Amino acid sequence: MLSFWATHTHVSELVTCYGQRGVSAETVASKACAMKEHYLDSVAVVGEHLADQLLLPMWLAGGGEFVCGAPSQHLQTNAELISRTTGSQIVLERVGKATRVSLRS
């Protein structure tokens, strides 16, 4: 396992890659570095694997928005599920290479 922290004034992002049988440590390190560089080169505040997890707390809080990179399938599925079951609408709006995620009640 290899992890990197990207720590900024108001947000921290953790990038983790796990080794697997038959994959060299160098390959795992290269993948982890590429994932961190991809995050740092974007305008996203929220990383790909955190975005879908923030939707339910955002709904419970009654609103909010954040910016992430390209929406993962998990993010899209969670947004649709919350929208269908709560009457609130999770909106995914592409803004350049980023995605603005917001809640509309």
Image (tube, rainbow, N blue to C red):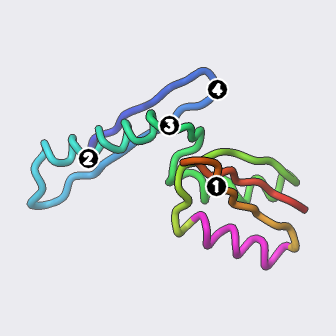
Real-space Cα separation, disc 1 to disc 2, in angstroms = 26 Å
Which region is colored magenta? 75-86
Q: Report which residue position mark 2 lands on.
A: 31
| 60 over 88 or under it: above or below | above
For discs 1 and 2, the disc positioned in front in the rendered view: 1
Q: Is residue 94 left or right of residue 85?
A: left
For discs 4 and 1, the disc positioned in front in the rendered view: 1
Real-space Cα separation, disc 4 to disc 1, in angstroms = 23 Å
Q: Nearer the viewer, residue 6 or 60?
A: 6
- Give the percent coordinates (x, y) of residue 13: 50, 37
Q: Report which residue position mark 1 lands on.
A: 94
Q: Is residue 45 left or right of residue 22?
A: right
Q: Earlier in the sequence, mark 3 or mark 1?
A: 3
Q: Earlier in the sequence, mark 4 or mark 1?
A: 4
For discs 3 and 1, the disc positioned in front in the rendered view: 1
| 53 over 16 or under it: above or below | below
- Mark 4: few, some, or many residues within 10 Å (few <14, many ≥20)? few
